[in-house]
Image (spheres, rainbow, N blue to C red):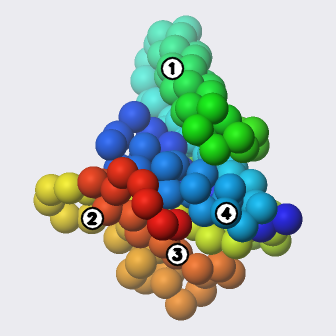
């Protein structure tokens, strides 16, 4: 089954990418995988504080992804796969693409202002020729329509 991989955070561009992926999956009989990445927090001096901060970040990320999951289930009738990883976002996406041959496209959102974010810069730049699937960059203002 064709799977559209979306990297989720709390940004408008991630929501636009999710909207596009959900509509595309609904039209093609595919599925959506939501990936959220929790970056490691380095507070070595106070291990307990670091663990509490990481747990809080994980809970916030899981709540955000579950909310996004419910939205596309309601809108497009698709139950997405949810993946939460820790570490560097570029490395996490690269690992998922390596692990999952069914990924038909990596869907990223473009910021409405300023330059591209680190994921768009990396995957549309230095890694563009090595991707195992197409890269789709969705404008932050995408509201729907044909996908």
Closer to the N terminus: mark 4 or mark 3?
Answer: 4
Disc 1 to disc 4, C-alpha distance: 31 Å
* Furthest-bottom residue in this view: 129
Mark 3 secondary-structure assignment: strand
Q: Are marks 4 and 3 in contact (CB under 8 Å)?
A: no
Distance Cα–Cα, label 4 vs label 2: 28 Å
For the residue labelled by badge 4, is the local secondary structure a helix, a strand or a loop? helix
43 or 142: which is nearer to us? Answer: 142
Q: Residue at x 70, y 72 (%)?
A: 104
Q: Horizontal and vertical percent for residue 12?
A: 33, 43
The residue carrying mark 4 is 27
Q: Nearer the viewer, mark 1 or mark 4?
A: 4
Q: Is residue 120 visible?
A: yes
Q: Residues within 10 Å of mark 4 (few under 14, many from 20)?
A: few
Residue furthest out toward the right: 1
Q: Nearer the viewer, mark 3 or mark 2?
A: 3
Distance of mark 1 from mark 3, alpha carbons? 27 Å
Percent of width and height locating residue 132: 68, 81
Which of marks 3 and 1 precedes in the sequence? 1
Q: Element at badge 1?
A: helix
Name the mark nearer the viewer: 4 or 3.
Answer: 4
Q: Which residue is mark 2?
A: 116
Q: Residue 120, percent across and down? A: 39, 67
User: Which numbered dot is residue 60?
Assistant: 1
In the rendered view, would you say 86 is above or below 49? below
């Amino acid at each position: 089954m064709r799977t559209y991989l979306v990297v989720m955070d709390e940004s408008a561009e991630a929501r636009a990418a999710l909207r596009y992926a959900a509509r595309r999956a609904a039209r093609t009989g595919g599925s959506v995988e939501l990936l959220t990445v929790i970056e490691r927090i380095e507070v070595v001096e106070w291990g307990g504080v670091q663990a509490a901060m990481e747990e809080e970040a994980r809970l916030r990320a899981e709540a955000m992804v579950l909310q996004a999951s419910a939205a596309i289930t309601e809108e497009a009738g698709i139950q997405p796969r949810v993946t939460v990883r820790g570490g560097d976002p570029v490395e996490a996406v690269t690992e998922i693409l390596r692990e999952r041959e069914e990924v038909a496209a990596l869907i990223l959102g473009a910021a409405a202002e300023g330059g591209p974010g680190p994921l768009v810069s990396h995957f549309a730049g230095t890694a563009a020729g090595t991707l195992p699937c197409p890269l789709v960059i969705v404008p932050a203002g995408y509201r729907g329509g044909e996908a």
